[in-house]
Amino acid sequence: MSGSVYKIVELVGTSENSWEEAAKNAVETAGKSLKDLRVAEVTTLDMRIENNKVMAYRAKVNLSFKYHTD
């Protein structure tokens, strides 16, 4: 029987500039230790606020990668 199995992890990326950069930071940082990244799904966007100012953009990302048994 052939097929593949994928693991999904939930990450939160942050950026002072944008949600897109926050999501990119999450994926690229995970890619330093995980192999065979496949799909990233942004599930939630929010902002960290201090003193009525946006301090950071946050992106919650579900990231899948191929699961290897070897």
Image (spheres, rainbow, N blue to C red):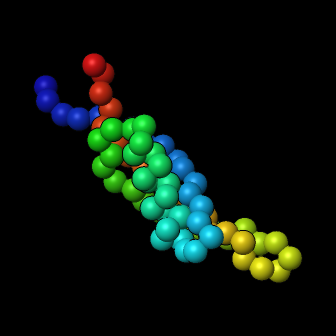
Taking the image as shown, residue 53 lies to the left or right of residue 51, namely left
| Percent position of residue 34, x then y | 39, 38
State the residue lying farthest toward the bottom: 52
Residue 8's image quarter?
top left
Taking the image as shown, residue 56 lies to the left or right of residue 27, namely right
State the residue lying farthest toward the top: 70
Image quadrant in which the C terminus is located: top left
Residue 31 to residue 54: above or below: above
Query: Would residue 2 be visible to someone looking at this image?
Result: yes
Image quadrant in which the N terminus is located: top left
Which residue is more in the foreground, 70 or 51? 51
Q: Residue at x 60, y 61 (%)?
A: 14
| Percent position of residue 58, x then y | 61, 64
Which residue is more in the foreground, 36 or 5? 36
Residue 38 to residue 13: above or below: above
| Percent position of residue 33, x then y | 42, 37
Taking the image as shown, residue 2 lies to the left or right of residue 34, namely left
Taking the image as shown, residue 50 lies to the left or right of residue 48, namely right
Q: Residue at x 33, y 38 (%)?
A: 35
| Percent position of residue 60, x then y | 55, 58
